[in-house]
Image (cartoon, rainbow, N blue to C red):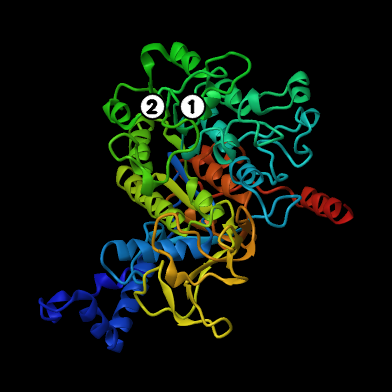
Amino acid sequence: MSSPLSSFSVGSCDRRTNVLLCLAEQEKDPVFWNSWAQRTLKNAMNTQEPNKNVAKNLILFLGDGMGVPTVTAARILKGQLSGQYGEEVQLEMDKFPYVSLSKTYNTNAQVPDSAGTATAYLCGVKANEGTVGVSAAAVRGQCNTTQGNEVTSILKWAKDAGKSVGIVTTTRVNHATPSAAYAHCVDRDWYSDGEMPAEALQDGCKDIARQLMENIPDINVIMGGGRKYMLPKNTSDVEYPEEKKHSGTRKDGRNLIQEWIDRRKDKGYYVWNKQELLSVNPSTADYLLGLFEPGDLTYDLDRDRSTDPSLTEMVEVAIKILRKNPEGFYLLVEGGRIDHGHHEGKAKQALHEAVEMDRAIGRAGLLTSAHDTLTVVTADHSHVFNFGGYTMRGNSIFGLAPMVSDVDQKPFTSILYGNGPGFKLVNGSRVNVSTVDYQQNDYQAQAAVPLRMETHGGEDVAVFAKGPMAHLLHGVQEQNYIPHVMAYAACVGQNKAHCRSGNSATSIAIAPPSLALIITATWLLC
């Protein structure tokens, strides 16, 4: 449904009246709700014919850890940041016409991690937790199970089809989510050879940073953090030269950044701060490597706006470079620190990260067209995060519930975690949150079970889609279904036969009945 503010008439109220009070008055009238619903119904009827064009461009926005409660809370926060109640506004992803659910489990985990899930929504196969770009036959940490079990990603399928490709993340560029786009690694933590066991190196396994530079050497745009994993051990960082923890980690002595620069010569740009990024001319840049921190990027709330680019700014530059290709592009965008905020119990950080990713979704929509661009927004998994307590309409999303506990007689915030670092006792009882600043950026919301790091949640996550063939993302699906739909829409990877008949992706190759019966019988016998 469209936002109720589109049906809200300021003119029907005295302009001196508070707009929110005016909206509250209009909401008392059944006509307000009926007319809003009727407009939404009319819009739905007008857009019921699916877009069956071939997708020239593909964009996947991945909110790491952005479960449905996070989406809802981010929506409220977005509205409250603009002076509204919050509940009634729309996120950019809310405006997408198709929504489905994705089942996130890994092949060996009911509650998944970001590596196995990334392999699913990028490579099209479910995998074990902790592994990237390999099938479930590979075992985490066992280097000798890598060879022969590699699986390729939709980024590679798109590149092989002649499209430009890019990766933009707020984490390290060799973190779990982006690494599944280009790497084949049995351990997500092998960021550089400095993090790998000697046995794995002896057996010939490669670290993820090295694979970024070697496996698909012509990725057009790479932006995020992770400088230290590209540099020789103890090499000082350009931004933090006095801080040893930010120094290079590579034992092989390679400077992967310089290697990239030397390979690109006059066709590519390496940047490490916002000023350099915004000085890049997209019309002359075919390749861009942007590494803005030694590790992950800073939280958006803590970002130095003069030196650190936002996710929205990175996405805009990426699209302007990639869209020059007449064959189109594939772009993976990760709002990766939503997940980190939740793990640390810092809901305010996590939700502001989600709102920033939504801004980036909006910017991407302005730079592309749903006529020829399939845009998908989803999450890899959820978190044990929620909000409740019968809060009143417009209550600050970070505020208190309107009652105290009927057990310990203490107030509590609406936002709570099932587990995590927010579990704290004072004199054997729960902390009285009214004695602390629960609105501060790094406040750790109370948790039911004490853990140093809060855990993922295992429920399904939402998939929002718009553009060519977006209607195929419907119902409740396995997570590995996502890249198959995107590839089908763009005529890359498997199922390309339907593209030969013209500019429409309307038919899909169906296995002969006899083969289908054989496959079914084999599955039943397994």
User: Farthest residue in the front direction?
Assistant: 427
Amino acid type shown at disc 2: Trp
Q: Quadrant of residue 220?
A: top left
Quarter location, residue 271: top left
Residue 466 to residue 218: above or below: below
Q: Position of residue 382 (x, y in %)?
A: 57, 58
Near mark 1 (Cα within 10 A), the count class, few <14, some 14-19 or many ≥20, is many
* Residue hosting label 2: 272
Instruction: Using the numbered discs, state the Cα–Cα distance from disc 1 to disc 2 in whole angstroms.
Output: 9 Å
Residue 318: x percent and y percent? 38, 34
Which residue is the site of mark 1? 227
Amino acid marked by disc 1? Arg
Q: Residue at x 47, y 37 (%)?
A: 330
Label 1: which secondary element: helix
Q: How many marks?
A: 2
Query: Which sits in the foreground, 315 or 479?
Result: 315
As drawn, is 213 to the left or to the right of 199? left
Examine the rendering and report whether any part of residue 236 can be seen. Answer: yes
* Residue lying at 45% horizontally and 11% vertically, measured from the top left: 262
Image x and y of residue 263, in percent: 47, 12
